[in-house]
Amino acid sequence: MKRAGTSRGALPGTGGARLRLPALLRTLAALCLPTLLALAGTTPRKVLVGINRDYPPYEYLDTRGHPAGYDVDLLRALAEVEGLDLEFRADTWDGTLQAFRAGRLDMLAGMLHSQAREAFADFSTPHLVVHYSIFVRRGDARVRGEADLAGLHTLVERGSQMDDHLRATGLGPFLVPVDSEPEALRRLAAGQGDAAVAPQLEGLVLAKQDHLGIQSVGGPVFTRQLCFATRKGDAELLFRLNTGLAILNQTGRYAELYQGWFGHLEPDPREGLALTRRALAILGLVAAALVLVALWNRSLRRQVAQATARLHQANREIRDREAFLDTVVENLPVAVFGKDPRRNYAFTLWNARSEQIFGLPKAEVMGRTDQDFFPRAQADGFRAKDEEVIRAGRILEIPEERITSRSLGEIVLHTRKVPLFDETGTPILILGISEDITDQRAMEEALRQAQKLESLGVLAGGIAHDFNNLLTAILGNLGLAGLHAPEGHPAVPFLRNAEATALRAAELTRQMLAYSGKGVFEVRPVDLNRAAGEMASLLKVSISKKAALRFRFAEGLPAIEADPAQLQQVVMNLVTNASEAIGEGDGEILLATGMEELDAAQVAALHPGSPIPPGRYVFLKVEDSGAGMAPEVLSRIFDPFFTTKFTGRGLGLSAMLGILRAHHAGIGIRSEPGRGTEFRLFFPASPAGAARAEHQAGPAVPLRERGTILLADDEPEVRASTAAMLRGAGFEVLEAADGQEACEICQREGDRIRAVLMDLTMPRMDGRSAAREILAADPRVRIILTSGFPVDSDVRTPADPQLAGFLRKPYQMKDLLAALQRALEST
C-alpha cells in the first residue's frame, strides 16, 4: 500500500545546499537568538487553530466532541516544546477555510500546499505527503483512471484542492460536492454516486473501520504536501512551527506519532517470514541437512541485510536532518550569508531572504565577492568589517548600515557577523545575518514628524482661538459701523473692504489649522481657480528659487464640491514635490485648470486607488520639468512611508490619495525619467453651476423675535461687540464672564432668558458643563455654543435636541442673527 509520507517516520525533505558543520549550526542559533527572542516573546502565545471536523485520521472530532487525529497530536507535541497555548476550533473544511481567510483563525492544523494558496497563507515545512485516489464499490470495473470519470457522478469534498483540480480538467458538470471526504466515501458505499475521490490513506482507514465495501482503483491521481498554514506575514509563528518540527524530528517524537497513527496500515513482513519458516519446516522433514544449511545461510543474509538497512536508515536520517536545517535557514525572515576567508571572502552561503533584500540571485552570488556586486566604497567597508570580526574573534554588531540594493534601492540594515575557526585556529567562515530595518526607520521618522505636527497643531489651535476672538470683535464692530452708516456714505465701501479682509484672515486661520491636522473640514462649492490663485504667494516662497512657477487657469469653470483647506493642502503638496523633483537646477512648474469630459477608456487609464465614473470633471494639473520617475518608483509613490529620500516633509502622497477619495476625485499620472512629471486631478463638476465668491459681506436680516439673551464669553472685547450687535437688533442682553456666572444668572433671572449664546472655552466652568447644568434646570432654554477652537462634529451638530446649534468664531452680525432666529423659531 502506498504510504502518505516519505521515509518511515521522517519529515519530507527539501533540496538545496546542505550545512554539515555542527559548529556552523550552533553559531547560526547564537546569531538568530536576539531576533527570535524579540519575535517570540517570553510568555506562551495564544494561537487559534482551525481543524476539519471530519477528516480522519488527520483531524476530526471524536465521539466526545474533542479534537483528535494525527495533525492534532503532532501540533500538541509541537506546542509543548515551543510554549504555544493552542485553542482548537472545528468546522467543515469550507467553513474553516473561510474563517482563516477572514482573519478569525491564526493557523490551520493541516492544509495542502499550492501556489494559489500562497497568496493568502504561509506554509510550514511539510510534515506529510497526501496521495488522492479514486474509490469505487467493490466489483465496479468501469473506472481504471481519471479519464474514466467523465459522465459518472463523482463525489468530492466541496472547496477542496481535489474539487478545483477536477473542475480544471473539465469534470465539473459530473461532480457531486459534499461537506467532507468521509461523507463522500460513505455516500459512495450507500450507492449515492458512481465514484469518489479522496486521500488514499483516509479511504483505506474508513473502509476498514466502517466495513464500507469500497476499493481504490488505479494509482494516485493527485499528490500534495500537507503543511501547517499561518496567516500571511506571521513570520514569528511560522518560525516557531518549523523549529518545533525540527525538534520533534530529531528527538524521535515525530516517528512515534507517525507509527502510532499509520504503522498498523503497512503490511507486516514477519507474516511472510512465518509462512517461509513453516514451509522450511515441512521441507526439513524431507531433507533436514539441506534445510539446516539453507537456514544458516538465510540467517547470515538477514543479518547482513539488517545491518545494511540500519546503515541506510542512519544515512537517511542524517540527510533528512541536514535538509530540514537547510529549509529552516532558507526560510528565516532575515538574510543569512557566509563568506570563506580562505577564498578571498567568496560567498558560500546565501538564503532566499538574502536574494530578496540584496536583489542578487543565489546562482549569481555563490563563489564571488562583495567587489563583484557593490560600489567600491561599500565593498571596501564590508571587507573592513570582515577583517575586524576575525581579529576580534567574536560577534560583531553593526546596528545600522546603509547600502544600495539592486531590487529595493537604498535600504538600512542591522547586521551581525561572527567568525568560525577550525581546530588549528584558522578562520574558515564568516557567518552574517542582516535584517532590513528600512521601514522601521521610516516609521520612526514618521512618528517624529507626527509629533512635530501634533505640537504645531496645539500651537495653531491656541493661536486660532485668540485670533478668532479678535476677528469676532473686529467683524462685530465693522458690522455695527456698517449698520449705522447710511447707504451711499463714503465710508461704506471701506467698511465692506475691511470686513472682507477680516473674513480672509479667518480663512487663513482655518488653512493653518488644516495643515497642522487640527482643522474641521467643511465641503462646499469652491472656485478652483480662486482657491489655487490665492496660494500664489505662499507657493512661491515654498519652492526653490530656481524653479519658475507659472499659472494657466481656464475661464468660466463650474464650482467643485470640496473643502477649501484640504484642496489647498493638496496643491501645496504637489507643488513642493515638483520643486524637489527639479532639485538644485533651473526648472519650471505649471499650475493649470480646465474642464474635460472623460469616457470609460479614459477613466480606466487613471490611478486605481481613487476610482471615478465617466462624466464631466474640472481638472487641476501640476506639471514639472524635473527628473521624472522610473516605472518601479511610479508604482509605489502612494505606498505609506515610501520615499526616494531618507527624510521628507509635507502631506505625503498616500494621505493625498485619501483626500481625493473623500472628494470622489480621480488622479492621472504621467512621468518618464528625464522628461518630468505631470499630476492631473479630476474633481466632479458641481451642479451649482459657475463658481461664485464664497464670502459675501452684507447687511444682517432683520429678526422677527425679541427678548432677553444671556451672553457668556471670557473675552471682554467679544462680549462688548456681540452685546452691541444683539442690542442693535432689539434684544435685551445679560452678560457673564464664565460658565459659573452664566449658571448663576440663569438661576436668578428664571423665565426672562429666551436663549443663551455661550463660548465653549471659559475659566471656572466651560461651556459644555454650563450648558448641561442650565438645561437640567430649564430644558426650554435654547443654547447656542460658540468657539474659536476647532471642535468635534458632535458639538457643531449636537445630538441633543435641547442644544440649538453651534456658531463658529469669527462670525458676522448676519451669522449671529440668523443663528438666533433659527434657535428661537425652534422653541
Image: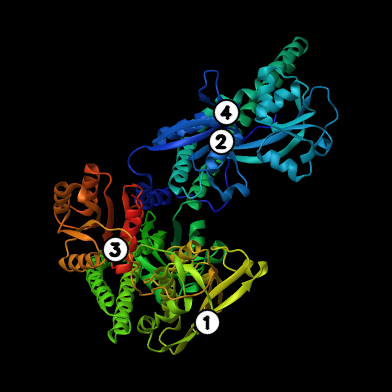
Query: Identity of the amino acid at label 2?
Result: Thr
Q: How many marks?
A: 4
Query: Identity of the amino acid at label 4?
Result: Arg
Q: Which residue is mark 1?
A: 676
Q: Which residue is mark 4?
A: 53
Mark 2 or mark 1: which comes first in sequence?
Answer: 2
Report crowding for label 3: few under 14, some 14 to 19, many 20 or more residues within 10 A (C-alpha). Answer: some
Q: Residue at position x 42%, y 49% from top?
A: 25
Q: Which residue is mark 3?
A: 454
Mark 3 or mark 4: which comes first in sequence?
Answer: 4
Q: Secondary structure at mark 2?
A: helix
Q: How far, Cα to Cα, is label 4 from label 1?
A: 60 Å
Q: Nearer the viewer, residue 272 or 503?
A: 503
Which of the 4 image quadrants contains residue 726? bottom left
Q: How far, Cα to Cα, is label 1 from label 3?
A: 34 Å
Q: Residue at position x 41%, y 32% from top?
A: 80
Q: Which residue is mark 2?
A: 96
